[in-house]
Amino acid sequence: MMGDVLRRGLLAGRASFLEPRRTGLLVPFGRQMTAAIGSQRHGVGSISAFDSIVFRNLFGTDEIRSVFSDKAYIGRCVEVEAALARAQSKCGVIPADMGKQITAQADASALDLDRLRNETDIVGYPILPLVRQLGNMCGPAGMYLHWGATTQDIMDTASVLQMKAGLEIVEAKLEGVGAALGHLARTYRDTPMAGRTHLQHALPVTFGYKAAVWLSSIQRHQERLRELKPRCLLVQYGGAAGTLASLGSGPKGIEVRKQLAVELGLADPPITWHVARDGVAEIINFLALVGGSLGKIALDLIIMSSNELGEVAEPFVPHRGASSTMPQKRNPISSEVILAASKVLRSNAGLVLDGMVSDFERASGPWHLEWVAVPESFVAAAGALHQTEFALAGLVVHPDQMEANLQSTRGLIVGEAVMMSLAKHIGRQNAHDVVYEACRKTIEGDSQVILFETLSKDERVTDVICADELKGLCDPMNYLGSSQQMVEDTLAYFK
């Protein structure tokens, strides 16, 4: 399975995700770059790394960008207008055949986007200019377009449809990252390494345990995603102030909203949420949580791949991570990009939280923050997940170096093991002081002396602990606690 993932290649955001037997990623990247420049010359002037012809494949994928492109958004707006007409036809609000006619004639591909852009600059929102063009397309049926709706109804629902599609991509990529981590946890369940706190040796762990800790957060994100979908993916239809007054005081407004939800595959809320933006904020904060977990993984990988530790390395691809001046360099590029995306996601979480603070029944500005934060966050999240899957699926692991690093502190890493055993005989604090002194002597003495040898010369230890027991206490493999069982429990969590 891991080999298949690697063959997909780092730049798998393209339409052809799978590149059989091709791991030299610079070749397809070069072709893609040429095609992109030829077909999207307007992108050369991009001011964002997410849209940049140069950087875009580091920070996102074509798949996620296609969901949040301008054309995709306008297409969703047209989809909502058509669905609203169908819902109103079925509910008897407009003539029965108007919904089908509008759906057949409202063609997003026929829109004059330059005109739409220019008129949006004037109006401030794209819906009025959009409805004008659609009305002309639909002929007599056009008079029933946008019936009883307000601009935010269409824009919010279009955005929710984008987020729904975006979450499907995120869900699939979370599964890929989870599979890669599950493989690492299972494969290296019993591979010992130094556990570190404050970047110092703490206690022995296994690399499988570390991978399972990473995996546990991904599993919780998968659970969060399943839970938030019905709560946050809500249709929006309320009219000018959210009361649906334009459809009268009877049940028609509620019926239309419910049918609109059915038409679009969204949940029907009990009340308009024009200024209750917690659903959008929850989705973007969910992406920020995912980014936080990915950032933690990336930071660990960066440190573990340093020359001083040398415990892991990102997958080898010719020239990836190369320096323009230092030919020996193999920088952890994916992890660095993941860290940057993680920061962007956490920053955007603050933007949508600010967007929640809306005035009265229609906000005078905060809503606009979502126009920036939502698409950017989805592109950053999908890109970071893509880079994470690539790095983990082909991660090069060096168990021998993990073992060497574990032994590098000459047994000090099992000081707690000795202390806890000795405490049964002389009390915990006294045991702590004895082992602390032994550790100090080991550190300050001959560099070839190990903790076991120092302890073996201390009668306070040897009087109560025999040599064989002491030797066992000083073996890191005997002090892994429940870590291996935790790996098994984590792997079985969703089975």
Image (cartoon, rainbow, N blue to C red):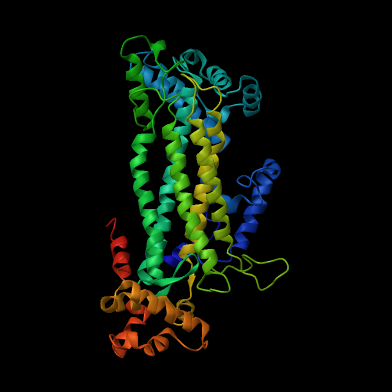
Q: Is residue 396 visible?
A: yes
Front position in the image: 389 or 94? 389
Residue at x 28% of width, y 62% of height:
489
Side (left or right) of 57 relative to 232? right
Give the side of residue 205 with respect to residue 463, left or right: right
Residue 66 on image: x %, y %: 53, 42
Q: Position of residue 15 (x, y in %)?
A: 52, 50
Q: Considering only vertical position in the picture, is 269 above or below 301?
A: above
How many marks do you count on the picture? Answer: 0
In percent of width and height, residue 330 lies at: 61, 69
Q: Pick whichever, 419 or 41, lies toward us.
A: 419
Q: Is residue 481 above or below residue 234?
A: below
Q: Is residue 22 visible?
A: no
Q: Quadrant of residue 411?
A: bottom left
Residue plotted at (41% across, 25% down): 273
Does 177 sit above or below residue 473? Answer: above
Is residue 47 toward the left or the right of residue 441 in the image? right
Q: Is residue 158 left or right of residue 318?
A: left
Query: Where 282 falls versus 255 (above or below)?
Result: below
Q: Residue furthest right?
A: 325
Q: Residue at x 66, y 44 (%)?
A: 39
From the viewer's side, name the closer residue of 223 and 135: 223
